[in-house]
Amino acid sequence: MKIVVVGCGKVGTSIATELNSEGHEIAVVDIKHDAVTRLSESIDVMGIEGNGATYEVLVEAGAQTADLVIAAAARDEINLYTCLMAKAAGTPHTIARVRNPEYTKDLYRVKDQLGLSMAINPELTAATEISRLLRFSGALEIDSFSRGMVELIKVAIPHDSHINDKKISQIDILKGKVRICSVERDGKVYIPNGDFVIKGGDKISVVSKAETAAKFFKKINVAIGRSRDVILLGGGKVSYYLALKLIKSGANVKIIEKNAARCTELAELIPDAVIIHGDCMDQDLLLSEGIEHADGIAALMDYDEENILISLYLKGASKAKIITKVNNTSFDSILDNLSFDRIIHPKSLTGEYIARYIRAMQNSLGSNVETLYRLNDDRTEALEFRVKQNSRVCGIMLQDLNLRDNLQIICINRHGKIILPQGSDVIMPDDTVVVITKHKGLSDLDDILSKH
C-alpha cells in the first residue's frame, strides 16, 4: 500500500518503521528538516519537508494517490485537520493520533463527519496492554486473536511443576482445550511437536480461551492470578486510562503523583482510586504505601530513567508484577540484561496497532492476513488468516498437509466456534486460522505449505 505519515516524532517514526518493514511504500512529512532527514535516511523512504496539514504539501507527498494518510503530529487538532485535508486531496483512508482524553471520549460523535478510518491514542493503547498483563499477573506476555476469543499467553515453568521432563504428548491436562505452541530455552525458540520435552525454567506460550488457560496454569503450578491491589507510579495519561480499566475489573488502585495540582485533578476524575501526593522515587513512601503487599506495580512516570531505576528497586522490595514504561527504545540493549518483568513502549505499540489495522484493510483488498504478532523478541510470528474459497489447504486433514518445518497451526475459528485442531481436523472456507512460525513474511495461508 502507498502510505503518507505526517509527523516524524517518536510515534511517527515507530509507525513508519513498522509499516516500511512490512513492504509498504512510505512517504514521511514533517515541518522540521532534521526530523525528515533522520527518518527518511534511516529507513530509506521519501521525505517531504513542510506543513503536513496543508493541501499543497500533502499533494507533494502523494496523498492524492495514496491508500492511507496517518497524522501523527504533536497536536491533536493538527492531526484531525490533516485528515480532513487528506480527504479533500482524495485519500480514501485516514488515521489520526488523538491523545487528549476529552477528544478521545467524544470522537465517535464526529468520526464519520471527519472521514476518519481510525483514531489511535498511544496512552490508551499502552493502558489497554498493561491492563491485560495485570489481568494475568503471572504472564510474561499476552496476545489475543479472533477478536479476543482466544489468547496466546506466555509463562515461565517453575522447576517444581509436574509437567517438567514430560513430552507435550503426555501432558493430558485439559487436552483439546489448551495447546503449547512455542518454547523458549537458553536463548533459543522452538515450535514444539508432541515429542518435545518440557523443562523447568522454560518459557512456554499457550493458546486457549482465557478462562481455560487459568485452570491449566493452576494445575501445572504456575502462579497466574489476577492483580487485585495495584499501585501506579505517576499520574499521567497512561495512569488515568489504566486506573479506569483496572477499577472496572474490580481491582483496588492507588496512584502516587508528585504534582499537587494533578493529584487534585485525578481525585475528581477517578473518585474510586486512592490518590497519594508524593515522590515516586521516595523508597520510604513506597514502603509506607504497601508495595510489599501489592499484586501489580506500574512505573509510568514521565522520565524513562526514573521508571527504570525505581523498577530495579522494586524487584528486590516487592513480589508484585512490575510493568515499566520506557519510551526510548535505545535503552533496549541495556534492559535486556536486567530481567525486567515487562517493558512497555507506548510509541512502538501505536505502530503495531496501526499495522494490524492496515493488515485488516489489506484483507479486504486481497491479502488474507488479519492479525500478526511478533513474538519471542521478533524470532517468531503468530498470524491469523482468513481462509479463501480457493485455498489449497481446504478440505484436507491437517495430518495430511505437507506443512513447513518450524510452523504449527494452533487455532481455527469457525463462525465463533474455537477449535484447537488435531490431526483429523480440516480447514474450511471462511474459517480464520492462527499459525505460529519462525518463518517471516508469510502473506497467504497457502504459504504454510512446504515447497518441496
Image (cartoon, rainbow, N blue to C red):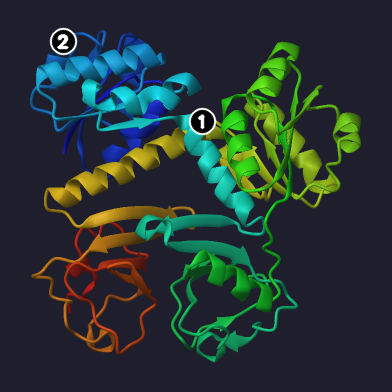
Q: Is residue 387 visible?
A: yes
**Image point (91%, 35%), residue name:** 288
Q: Does dot 2 land on a helix, a strand or a loop?
A: helix
The residue carrying mark 2 is 55
Q: Which image quadrant: the C terminus?
A: bottom left
Relative vertical location of residue 7 with respect to residue 376 in this rendering, above or below: above
From the viewer's perspective, tell me whether residue 255 is left or right of residue 362.
right
Residue 149 percent across, percent down from the top left: 42, 62
Residue 383 percent across, percent down from the top left: 32, 60
From the viewer's perspective, tell me whether residue 278 is left or right of residue 133.
right
Marks counted in the figure total: 2
Residue 422 percent across, percent down from the top left: 36, 85
**Image point (41%, 35%), residue name:** 350
The residue carrying mark 1 is 123
Q: Quadrant of residue 278?
A: top right
Q: Quadrant of residue 400?
A: bottom left
